[in-house]
């Protein structure tokens, strides 16, 4: 396993930790590859009954490492493919969120079935600040979870919300003191793991199927719109400005 990810087996559940604390656990190529490998191992292990995802250091995950991701291109293994694999994991997943969970980091947490946040957590989506557009699936996941009004607040303002507001929105299930986050997540994982495994796995499939059918709509035109936005001059300017630590100059092109 790459140094960028730590995997710990705790009886019949697994804790996966993002391990780039010096980069606020920003997701780069190595993290994507390591996470994909960890998920493959979990899929193949029928004794694993729950998964906790957390971050080392001061925060959960600050998002994608844009400098690294930009160099990867669109082929091969991508963050979107790993997120899809995480969503399809047959066992319940728990995000233990502390510090910042921003953009890709929040998507990672949102993909988990359950989310616990520490009191000092901040959660947000910032694509509007760099001229990007999340994929249709990400918008669908937000609307499924917090509804269209809260999704609009999160996306349009591009400001992180604190743990209390996230709980009001339904973005997280529970808020706990900072020093109780790890133990609470471990307790939830152990409780799930102690339940009947066939029942729990079937419950996850039931929930996924119900939601999938409820939100299944044609969205080819939205995919095309997303590609247009992500390949725009504004999007390129937004990334450059972010990396150069300056304000972007938007031209609407």
Image (cartoon, rainbow, N blue to C red):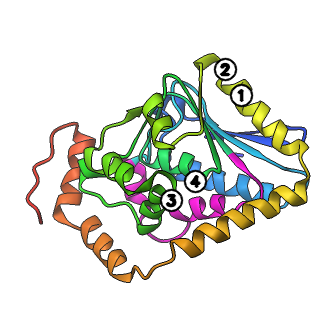
Secondary structure, mark 3, is: helix
What residue did someone put label 3 on?
Answer: 144
Secondary structure, mark 1, is: helix
The answer for how far apart the CA atoms under marks 1 and 4 are is: 19 Å
Q: Position of residue 242 (x, y in %)?
A: 25, 43
Secondary structure, mark 4, is: helix
**Mark in front: 3 vs 4:** 3
What residue did someone put label 1 on?
Answer: 184
Do callouts 3 and 4 mark residues in contact (Cβ within 8 Å)? no
Crowding near the residue tagged with mark 1, few <14, some 14–19, many ≥20 C-alpha atoms within 10 Å? some
The numbered mark, 3 or 4, whose residue comes first in the sequence reads 4
Mark sitting on residue 192: none
The answer for how far apart the CA atoms under marks 1 and 2 are is: 6 Å
Q: Position of residue 222 (x, y in %)?
A: 34, 75
Q: Quadrant of residue 70?
A: bottom left
Secondary structure, mark 2, is: helix
Crowding near the residue tagged with mark 3, few <14, some 14–19, many ≥20 C-alpha atoms within 10 Å? some
Which contiguous range is marked in magenta?
A: 66-93
For residue 7, side relative to residue 126 (left or right): right
Mark sitting on residue 111: 4
**Mark in front: 3 vs 2:** 3
């Amino acid at each position: 396993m790459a140094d960028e990810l730590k995997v710990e087996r705790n009886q019949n559940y697994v804790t996966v930790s993002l391990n780039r604390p010096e980069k606020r656990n920003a997701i780069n190529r190595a993290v994507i590859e390591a996470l994909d490998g960890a998920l493959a191992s979990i899929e193949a292990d029928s004794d694993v009954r729950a998964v906790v995802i957390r971050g080392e250091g001061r925060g959960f995950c600050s998002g994608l490492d844009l400098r690294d991701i930009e160099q990867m291109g669109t082929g091969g293994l991508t963050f979107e493919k790993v997120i899809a694999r995480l969503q399809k994991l047959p066992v319940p997943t728990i995000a233990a969120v502390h510090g910042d969970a921003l953009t890709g980091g929040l998507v990672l947490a949102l993909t988990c079935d359950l989310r616990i946040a520490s009191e000092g957590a901040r959660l947000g989506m910032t694509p509007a600040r760099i001229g990007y557009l999340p994929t249709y699936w990400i918008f669908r996941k937000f609307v499924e979870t917090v509804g269209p009004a809260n999704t609009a607040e999160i996306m349009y303002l591009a400001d992180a919300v604190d743990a209390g507001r996230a709980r009001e929105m339904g973005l997280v299930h529970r808020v706990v003191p900072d020093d109780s986050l790890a133990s609470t997540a471990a307790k939830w994982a152990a409780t799930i793991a102690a339940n009947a495994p066939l029942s729990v796995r079937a419950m996850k499939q039931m929930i996924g199927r119900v939601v999938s059918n409820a939100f299944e709509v044609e969205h080819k035109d939205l995919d095309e719109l997303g590609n247009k936005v992500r390949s725009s001059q504004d999007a390129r300017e937004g990334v450059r400005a972010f990396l150069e630590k300056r304000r972007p100059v938007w031209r609407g092109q």
